[in-house]
Image (cartoon, helix red, strand yellow):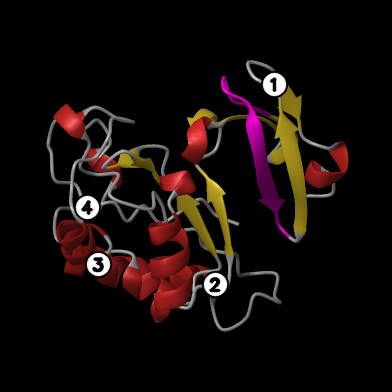
Amino acid sequence: MILAPVLDVARDPRWGRVEEDFGEDPYLTGVFGLAYVRGMQGDSLATDHTVIAEPKHFAAHGSPESGLNMSPVHAGEREVRTVMLKSFEPAIRAGNAMGVMVAYHDIDGVPCVANPWLLNKVLREEWGFKGFVLSDLGAKGLRARGGFEVSMEWKNGKLQSAEISNRNGGSCTVRYGEKTATLSVKPGEATRLNAELVSNN
């Protein structure tokens, strides 16, 4: 797997990652992204010269508040759909990218990594995405819906351990690949994910 292409639409010159992007035009970025995915994945992944492409940072990462990396993005659905998602759509629909890296910011208060509209409705239902989704590497302390906080430890590209906490306590269901687990979290305490859930990944 290659951690590319970067399909963020650079809309604020203050943002420190502008040089990683293809520019501020979502159409042009989408065309480049599609060509990149086709070039990396080829006609088949069952060869020694192709690799899974992983468009990133899904989505709207190029428009952070005040141009600060990891800052929230303030945009409504119309703007997100017509500008920020347009650069990703060709890579998924026409290019059949098999991986997507989800950004670590939030859009209008909802973290991208815990956004059912973004990940389920748009990506999987509307675009027909069949691959895998992972959060930006090294992400720690991502606040999910319901006040749950997830901390993950990675080593050599593999998830080693994960903990979930919530100051109010509660229960949540965690899915990792085909594996699922329902966790009961005590108020103010961290619950470690079952080792079996994060192994063999």
Quick check: is 165 in the magenta stretch?
yes
Q: Which residue is mark 1?
A: 190
Q: Name the amino acid, label 2.
A: Gln
Name the residue: 75% across, 61% down: 178
Classed neighbour count for the residue bearing mark 2: other residues with Cα under 10 Å, few (<14), some (14–19), many (≥20): many
Secondary structure of the residue carrying numbered label 3: loop
User: Looking at the image, is mark 3 or mark 2 nearer the viewer?
Assistant: 3
Secondary structure of the residue carrying numbered label 4: loop
Q: Which residue is mark 3?
A: 86
Query: Sequence-wise, which precedes: disc 2 or disc 4?
Result: 4
Query: Sequence-wise, which precedes: disc 1 or disc 3?
Result: 3
- Residue 29 lies, in percent from the top left, at 24, 63
**Magenta region, residue range:** 164-177
Q: CA distance from mark 2 to mark 4?
A: 23 Å
- Residue 111 lies, in percent from the top left, at 40, 41
Depth check: give the residue in front, 68 or 43.
68
User: Looking at the image, is mark 2 or mark 1 nearer the viewer?
Assistant: 1
User: Looking at the image, is mark 2 or mark 4 nearer the viewer?
Assistant: 4
Name the residue: 19% across, 41% down: 74
Q: Marks 2 and 3: in contact by CB < 8 Å?
A: no
Q: Name the amino acid, label 4.
A: Val
Q: CA distance from mark 4 to mark 1?
A: 37 Å
Secondary structure of the residue carrying numbered label 2: helix
Query: Sequence-wise, which precedes: disc 3 or disc 2?
Result: 2
- Main secondary structure type of the part rendered in magenta: strand
Residue 38 visible, this orientation = no
User: Looking at the image, is mark 3 or mark 4 nearer the viewer?
Assistant: 3
